[in-house]
Amino acid sequence: MSAASLTCFEKIWQAHVIISDPDGSDLLHIDRHYLTDLSATIGFEDMAARGNSIFDPQRTFVMPDHVIETGDDATAGLLVRDRFIVPLDQASEERGLTHFSRGSGTQGIVHIVGLEQGLSLPGTTIVCGDSHTSTNGAIGAIAFGIGQTEIRHVLATQTIRLRKPQLARITIDGGLAPGVFAKDVVLAVIGRLGADYGREHAIEFAGTAIAGFSIEERATVCNLAVELGARFALVAPDAKASAYVQNLPYAPKGAARDTAMVEWATLVTDPSAAFDKEAHIDATMVTPQVTWGTSPEQVANISASVPSIGGHEAIYDYIGLKPGDQLDEVPIDIVFIGSCTNSRIEDLRAAAAVAQQGSVAPGVRALIVPGSEKVRAQAEAEGLADIFRRAGFEWRLPGCSMCVAINGDVVPPGKRCVSTSNRNFVGRQGHGARTHLASPATAAASALTGRIADPTPYFARPRT
Amino acid sequence: MTAFTRHRGKAVLLDLDNVDTDLIIPMQPLLERPRSELGSWAFKAIRYDDQGHNLPEFPFNMPGAEDASIIVAGRNFGCGSSREGAVYALEAMGVRAVLAFSFGDIFYGNAVKNGLLPVRLNESHLGRVARVLAGRPAADRMLDIDLVCRSVTLPDGEVFTFDIEPSLVAQMLAGRDEVDATLMLEKEIRAFQANEAVAHSWRLPSHPPVIANR
């Protein structure tokens, strides 16, 4: 491989290798280690049990999100609060870690906070004990999920030993039709390529559609790459990435920033760089999507009917649908707008554009969980919170909430939820919960109509 | 971690693709139960009915299969969430190895680090294993797995080999803690950081102004 033909991913990887083992694995230095409430608590317990100390506290950040409550009523999940939330302030201070705590103005979902605080930067390596860490690839970083044993290794050594993955490029070209959003595009990609496509690969997203996306839209795409089976996903950093991080609290300033930008400009994928596999998607053909089954790859146009896939009666039983059912006639019980996939300010603007045209249908519970305290404050300043409340949506505090459903926000058994999250697995949102993944605009439209609904009628003009 | 050299055990056929880690272990017991108690919570959604009684069609619930220690699955076993608890739950059930066409990347690493052997077989070999076992009573589906030879031996004597990185084999055979091994390289890690502070100082997080009213 000549030095002149590298992908963005390879360039960042190579710049972080401390030692290459002859067996093919590399010891990588980690720039950022984000700890959720779960991984912080368990990580600290593991370290204490082994007598390890944290190698590099200044690169380690605590961001409670999974079990933290999203309502003023903190009694739901009280036991988990005592174990996973209450001790974090003191535990972080004792270890010299920055804790983005509730009420500080910075608390939120880990994969929202890292980007909006300027901690996640182009050309960095980022890990967290959560598979959707790939979200940070939106800024042009190598960001990936790790398990509990790996968390202890990173805490104790600030490194991880890993074999470089193979490389896949998914090129998405063309403009999006009105009512169609980044979430629809990536759901369509998963439907086309399958939940196993990205296994053992890092995915680079490229193409005119991706170039036209904002950092937040790229975050949605990189987030869902995990459901393509890819541990890593990124968009090569461009002028949008540099502009995004300007003046964010933890981003480089002054001379350091100037040096950084020169380096970031080199992180393009060389024109003749080779990928192990490639796919091409025409974004102009994508229409609003919704999942119909129990895997993100079971997705269809909202205008279509439930397809028939042989030998999987259990899926239809669980989801309570039959092949041939019209998806846009399926009544729903709950709408959840939130999660690391879609809870940023642009997502809330899209939902508000729909919400202001109606009210939540009778019998439907619709909740909106902004991704962070920063997003929440901005949404309030823009008047979005007022729009949501007037339309009958619950306006809640930041956290993972109903995506993983371990903080008391749960979909009851047998109830059907249109959700802007990333997993519709059996039991994910609650025992017997029926999940349909969709964009924030689709979710809002579904809340207003009381059934799975195409949001296109709510958008009069093409997006610029 | 538990070392793995070879294992002879009873296999169950879990004829499913995309078995995600939410299915393997729901989050709730992970937050509330010690590792050793997770076994009865594994596969809860497809293992018990709403009253908590065993569902007869779940492979481990079939007569003679209760003490099975090997799962034969389909594609993409262990996809989804990074929760290492999925491995702990399988371990607590007594599972020592999983045979599949493919595994979720993070699950694969988590399994290796805990001495649970993930065996990748190609489609035709996996199909052959499933067919041979399906032709036998549930109590009589023994497999021999040898990590040194990287082989799976069927009851009829057929042998298939599987691929696994040599470094992972060494790790699993030794059952050693990786942190101790890496800390022997502390000098090299600190040297890398020292160079970075000069050549790429922007990589260190800068500090925002202190917020007065927390």
Image: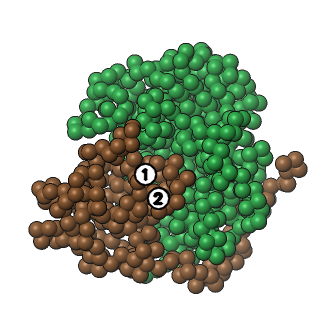
Closer to the camera in the image, B206 or A178? B206
User: x, y (%) of residue A7?
Assistant: 48, 61
Residue at x 54% of width, y 36% of height = A410
Q: Position of residue A438 (x, y in %)?
A: 48, 32
Q: Mark 2: few, some, or many residues within 10 Å (few <14, many ≥20)?
A: some
| Chain drawn in brown | B
Q: Which mark is residue A392?
A: none
| Residue where numbered disc 2 is placed | B37
Q: How is the image coloured?
A: by chain
Who's green, chain-wise?
A: A
Q: Nearer the viewer, residue A282 or B117?
A: B117
Please report the residue visible at 58 percent of the width from the left and 21 percent of the height from the top: A354
- Height in image: B190 above or below A361? below
Relative horizontal placement of residue B11, taking residue A340 as reference (left or right): left
In the image: residue A373, left or right of residue A455: right
In the rendered structure, the residue with mark 2 lies on which chain? Answer: B
Q: Say which residue appears at 60% left-offset and 47% top-offset.
A: A66
Query: How many angstroms separate mark 1 from mark 2 (CA)?
Result: 8 Å
Mark 1 near mark 2, Cβ–Cβ under 8 Å? yes
Residue A141 is situated, as x and y percent measured from the top left of the image, at 58, 57
- Judging depth in this view, the residue of B42 and B171 nearest the camera is B42
- The answer to whether one can see residue B86 in this image is yes
Q: Which residue is mark 1?
A: B41
